[in-house]
Image (cartoon, rainbow, N blue to C red):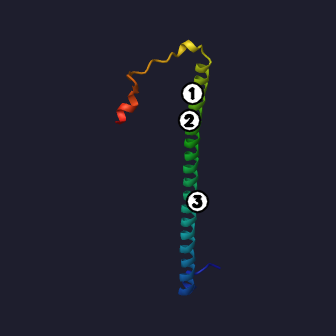
Amino acid sequence: MQFDLSAVETATMVFIGTLVFALVLVGFVLTAGFLALVMVGVGKLAWFLAATTLLTVVHEINSGWDRLVHHASTGSPGDFQGQPSPSTGSYPRVMLRDS
């Protein structure tokens, strides 16, 4: 016995067509939502990697600077000799600049 499509009522065919259309829409929305979540995850991962890299670089620069300053402070006092500041007699230059 073969199925005769002309024997199905119009209302039943409209109902089945609406269900098929709804399933296509649901598939589209689920796919779009999944792709959006994937893109957000990839963006967050990229931001995390960039921020971590930048913070690591800044931390290493600070550590290197601390080591350099510590090393320079352990040197002999003759390494860094102060220079006499220019003055204009009894008043320092700073006081004259403000007046």
Q: In front: 25, or 53?
A: 53
Residue at the spot x=56%, y=49% of the render?
42
- Amino acid carrying mark 1 in the image: Trp
1 vs 3, front mark: 1
Q: Position of residue 70 (x, y in %)?
A: 61, 23
Residue 27, relative to residue 66: is it above or below?
below
Label 1: element kind: helix
Read off the residue under disc 3: 34
Earlier along the polypeptide chain: callout 1 or callout 3?
A: 3
Residue 93, relative to residue 7: is it above or below?
above
1 vs 2, front mark: 1
Q: Quadrant of the C terminus?
A: top left
Q: Position of residue 8 (x, y in %)?
A: 57, 85
Earlier along the polypeptide chain: callout 2 or callout 3?
A: 3
Read off the residue under disc 1: 65
Which of the 4 image quadrants contains residue 24?
bottom right
Residue 44, relative to residue 68: is it above or below?
below
Label 2: element kind: helix
Label 3: element kind: helix
Earlier along the polypeptide chain: callout 1 or callout 2?
A: 2
Residue at the spot x=55%, y=46% of the render?
47
